[in-house]
Amino acid sequence: MGSALPPNDAEPIALLGGSFDPIHHGHLRAALDAATALGVRQVTLLPANVPALRDPLSASAEQRLAMLKLAVGDDPLLAIDGCEIARSGATYTAKTLRGMRQRWPDRPIIFLLGADAFSRLTQWQDWQSLLSLAHLGVLTRPGQALCAPADAHFMAQRCDAPALLTTRPQGNWCSITVTPLAISATAIRSLIAERLSPRFLLPDTVLDYINRHGIYRR
């Protein structure tokens, strides 16, 4: 379970973090939209081990990683990095990005996160250091309000063009408009718990795995 980051050390790294409990078409479409906006050839999915600010996850780390591999298949747009799952304990983005920055001091790194997670950014451990380690790309639906930290220095680092994030290693953030798909992992888990079908909300290969292993059932 190693890193599948792009091999060219000068190529920007676009990371989509999340619990992926389970991965669904909303995640996958957001990755495509972000890759297009940034002008990168690949987005690396970065599954959390134990998210520090989330309720306990329903699927195990191994199950979530298996579902990611099924969803990604051989699609060249998507890669998986299991570094946070391999590391025991709670997941802290700053720690992960710090390790990557030590490995690639001059390489552009863009950490992608949803607007809801962004609204809670000041609750993240060591959040003030994030822009010294990477750029932030905030995945936002059309018309969605963006709640940014009330910090003058942080607000001054905002830029309007996502592609600019690939021109320097770190230091900026911007919003990236994604397709407004009303799909959530919570809703998928609820459907399965009620013995209802979540088909067409997530890849068939992932749904087959969920059914085969009895995940999310009450």
Image (tube, rainbow, N blue to C red):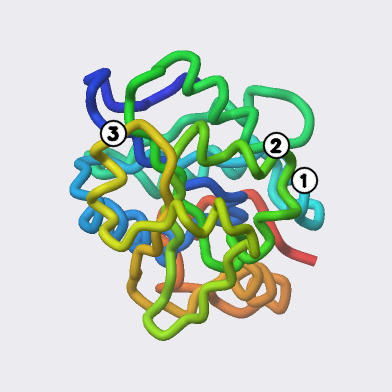
> In which image quadrant can residue 30 be found?
bottom left
Given residues 162 and 36, the one toward you in this image is 162
- Residue sitting farthest toward the bottom: 143
The label number, if any, that marks residue 151 in the structure image: none
Tell me which amino acid carries mark 1.
Ala
**In the image shown, does 202 or 166 lie closer to the viewer?**
166
> Residue 207 placed where, x, y %?
50, 60
Q: Amino acid at mark 2?
A: Thr
Marks 1 and 2: CB-CB under 8 Å? Answer: yes
What is the C-alpha distance between the residues marked 1 and 2? 6 Å
Q: Going 65% across and 70% down the picture, which residue do you hit?
A: 186
Tell me the SS state at disc 3: loop
Q: Residue at x 28, y 33 (%)?
A: 12
Please report whichever mark, 1 or 3, sits nearer to the chain's N-terminal start: 3
Q: Where residue 49 appears, x then y in whole percent? A: 68, 37
Q: Residue 96 or 187: which is nearer the viewer? A: 96
Nearest to the eye among marks 2 and 3: give it: 3
- Which residue is located at x 71 percent, y 54 percent? 122
Q: Which residue is mark 3?
A: 12
- Amino acid type indicated by mark 3: Pro
Please give the count of numbered marks on the rendered protein: 3
**In the picture provided, is 27 more to the left or to the right than 11?**
right
Q: Position of residue 194 (x, y in %)?
A: 71, 78
Q: Tell me the mark number nearer the camera, choosing from 1 and 3.
A: 3
> Nearer the N terminus, badge 2 or badge 3?
3
Position of 170 with respect to 22 (left or right) is left
Q: Is residue 28 visible from the viewing direction of this image?
A: yes
Query: What is the crowding at mark 1: few (fewer than 14 residues within 10 Å), some, or many (at least 20)?
Result: some
**Residue 78: horizontal and vertical position, in percent?**
32, 42
Q: Image quadrant for the C terminus?
A: bottom right
Question: Residue 52 — which label?
Answer: 1
Mark 2 highlights which residue? 91
